[in-house]
Amino acid sequence: MSAGDLAEGVLRGEVRAVARAISLVENAGPGLRALTEELVKGMREPYRARVVGLTGAPGVGKSTSTGTLIEAARARGERVAVLAVDPSSPFTGGALLGDRVRMQAHATDPGVFIRSMATRGHLGGLAWAAPQAIRVLDAAGYDLILVETVGVGQAEVDIASLADSTIVLLAPGMGDSVQAAKAGILEIADVFVVNKADRDGAQETVRDLRNMVALSGSRDWRPPIVSTVAARGEGAADLVAALDRHAEHLAASGEGRARRLARARDEIEAIVLTGLRARMGEISGDRHLDALAEALLAAKTDPYRAADQVIAAL
């Protein structure tokens, strides 16, 4: 299938074409550039889809909460796509598919597309191909794109640069107030969700979050804190309402366009850096770098001068 035919299938929303296009993105296949060009030409309204990211520590209920959001969006007649970023298999490099197991209730719904993506060693909780996969899903006409990260800790915050709205999930017993205050991941939240709110300690977790938000300084948007029991669907309406309010804020304040502009800039930069690394390998090669490393060890040059030599060769 040519890039033009594949792009036409994606633009018509054909599931098989969408799956093939995302595989091409993941593998950085030779037709990726042509496919992207055709998609951009054919998209009626780029960046039309709403992108919502879900992140948090392992075991807080990200997949179950994703399923709850799918159900709510489908009830409103929206087409939904899910990118579930899984850890990579140490043997095949593929996704472990753990998240898709928890979304089987929507597997046969023609209005729902679910795809697991492997991180393949990329840090930050996301797959390297995620931004371009989102473009494919946007071009296919999905109204809502849910991006679920791998279980992350305090520093993996790439989702904030990719999503229009970021949900940070926590659960009782995941740490005290000091831990909550220092966790860098909490600073990216547009909406906080305390899931498994039927457990002991849920109110303390909510209190700690409120204290942290109060100490976070002046912000145009104060992240709301929603309590849920995703396994039973409790709190789903409150979560959807909080996301809708944030979408209204993004539109009214102009922050939504600013975020998408930053997303586009980051994507261009990532492609440039990838191209430069490949070009550097072609021009300098391991021998050149080894020679520069030897000169550095012998104190015949400094690292900045060595880097300047590599850049000059480019």
Image (cartoon, grey):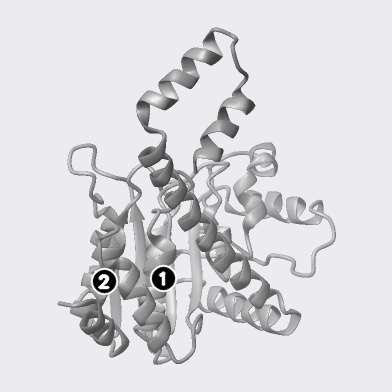
Element marked by disc 1: helix
Please name the amino acid that badge 1 sits on: Ile
Of 268 and 171, nearer the camera is: 268
Of 3 and 137, nearer the camera is: 3
Give the percent coordinates (x, y) of residue 255.
Answer: 70, 74
Of 199 and 128, nearer the camera is: 128
Q: Is residue 235 above or below residue 198?
A: below
- Relative side of 91 to 159, left or right: left
Which residue corresponds to mark 2? 21
Disc ID at residue 38:
none
Disc ID at residue 134:
1
Give the percent coordinates (x, y) of residue 38.
Answer: 35, 81
Please name the amino acid that badge 2 sits on: Ala
Q: Is residue 45 above or below residue 15?
A: below
Say which residue appears at 59% left-offset and 72% top-offset: 260
Give the percent coordinates (x, y) of residue 128.
Answer: 40, 54
Give the percent coordinates (x, y) of residue 133.
Answer: 37, 67
Q: Is residue 87 above or below residue 35?
A: above
Quadrant of res 81: bottom left
Spatial CA distance of label 1 from label 2 is 11 Å
Q: Residue furthest right?
A: 218
* Residue 92 visible, this orientation: yes
First in sequence: mark 1 vs mark 2: 2
Quadrant of res 257: bottom right
